[in-house]
């Protein structure tokens, strides 16, 4: 029973998939530019990200550990894709607040 609390496999997979969705929606060359230039596209993609998060939260009960694992997977996938750390930190903080 308590071991289920630490089973964050689905959360990790979702975090990585969420980062992949963000990257595909923003197109990699656009992400390298400043956020102000892509503000409209950024908002559109983030609305879809919010919808995916809400849907996932309805299916999966997230405790603090699972939330941390989800956000960690999201953050590292974006960093591995070559995004600037400041941009990734901002997106991850936004995701944490949304969970």
Image (spheres, rainbow, N blue to C red):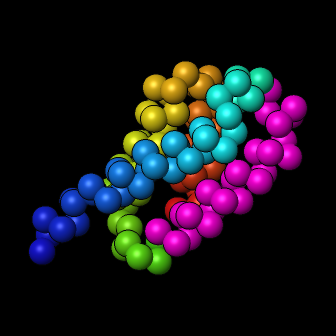
Residue placed most toward the observer, 25 or 50: 25
* Left or right of 3, for residue 57: right
Q: Is residue 64 above or below residue 68?
A: below
Q: Residue at 66%, 44% (x, y): give it.
A: 25
Residue 29: give x, y in percent of width and height.
70, 24
The picture quadrant where one finds residue 16 is: top left
> On the rendered structure, is 87 left or right of 70?
right
Q: Which residue is nearer to you in this view: 61 or 82?
A: 82
Q: Is residue 33 above or below residue 9?
A: above
Which image quadrant: the N terminus? Answer: bottom left
Q: Is residue 40 magenta?
A: yes
Q: Position of residue 53 (x, y in %)?
A: 54, 64
| Left or right: 81 in relation to 43 | left
Which span of residues is magenta-colored?
Answer: 34-56
Residue in the image at 62% along x and 57% along y: 49
How many marks on residues?
0
Question: Does residue 66 appear in this view?
Answer: yes
Give left or right: position of 13 versus 58.
left
The picture places residue 46, in percent across and down from the top left corner, at 69, 53
What secondary structure is the stretch in magenta mostly built from?
helix
Q: Is residue 71 visible?
A: no
The stretch drawn in magenta includes residue 44: yes
Could you say where residue 9 lies in the image, as x and y percent from the top left?
27, 55
Rendered position, 89 above or below 2: above
| Residue at 70% in and 51% down | 45
């Amino acid at each position: 029973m308590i071991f289920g609390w630490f089973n964050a496999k689905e959360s990790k997979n979702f975090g990585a998939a969420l980062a992949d969705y963000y990257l595909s929606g923003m197109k990699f060359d656009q992400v390298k530019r400043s956020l102000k230039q892509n503000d409209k596209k950024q908002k559109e993609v983030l609305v879809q990200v919010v919808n995916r998060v809400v849907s996932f939260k309805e299916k999966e009960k997230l405790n603090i550990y699972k939330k941390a694992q989800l956000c960690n997977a999201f953050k590292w996938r974006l960093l591995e894709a070559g995004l600037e750390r400041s941009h990734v930190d901002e997106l991850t903080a936004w995701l944490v607040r949304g969970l």
